[in-house]
Amino acid sequence: METVYLDNNAWDILFRRKVDLRIALPSSDYELAITREAELEIASIPHDALRSYAERSINERQIRTDTYFGYRDDSLPADEQRVGGYGVGRFADLSETTILAQESSRIGATMRPSRLYKHEADVSFAARSPCGILITCDKKGVLKRVEEKYGATVVNLSAWPDGEPLGDYIQRHLPRR
């Protein structure tokens, strides 16, 4: 079973193409996940129909939120915490920790309306690359670096041909086994 992490920007194309993730990426073949940072981004999507689509897809397809284990950041309110405590977060593996350490210097210092710092969501998303396939519409910056440097599988939905099933498109990007 493939683990697929959805970048927040993927919702735009999935919504526009009216993709039902229960059919396009069935739970028998794919485990779908978002990061905690993506959860915060989704909540701040200004387009009501797009936000509703993302939230409905998450609930209907049972997309899990992948949260790293960590201790509470006292500078953030409870509903803006990035990590989960005991029984909630998972420990990052060594390759994820390496990516987080190498890319965290790119995170900005100013909080945005999404309640995230500039590039914070991208770094967190890219760190999941050793554990699964990254689905995005923006394959530059940190995502381009993890693909080139670590061999991450980053699938760009901006190049997804009309008429091709999403699962087939993703499968074409997987490394040969």
Image (cartoon, rainbow, N blue to C red):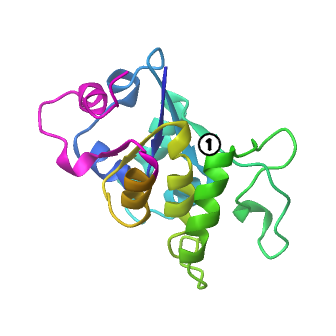
Q: Is residue 70 visible?
A: yes
Q: Residue furthest top?
A: 28
Q: Mark 1: which secondary structure?
A: strand
Q: Residue furthest bottom?
A: 110
Q: Position of residue 158 (x, y in %)?
A: 22, 51
Specify whether 177 is left or right of 111.
left
Residue drawn at (36%, 59%) of the image: 144
Q: Is residue 8 visible?
A: no
Decide: few, some or many residues near mark 1? Use Cα within 10 Å; few <14, some 14-19, many ≥20.
some
Q: Position of residue 172 (x, y in %)?
A: 25, 30
Q: Which residue is mark 1?
A: 65
Residue drawn at (19%, 42%) of the image: 160
Q: Quadrant of residue 23?
A: top left
Residue drawn at (55%, 30%) of the image: 62
Q: Position of residue 39 (x, y in %)?
A: 57, 53
Residue 94 located within the stretch drawn in magenta:
no
144 relative to 129, above or below: below
23 relative to 91, above or below: above
Q: Residue furthest left?
A: 162
Residue drawn at (22%, 41%) of the image: 17
6 relative to 120, above or below: above
125 relative to 104, above or below: above
Q: Which residues are magenta?
A: 150-177
Specify whether 33 is left or right of 66.
left
Residue 175 located within the stretch drawn in magenta:
yes
Specify whether 52 is left or right of 69.
left
Q: How many marks?
A: 1
Q: As shown in the figure, which amino acid type bears the numbered disc 1? A: Thr
Q: Position of residue 139 (x, y in %)?
A: 32, 57
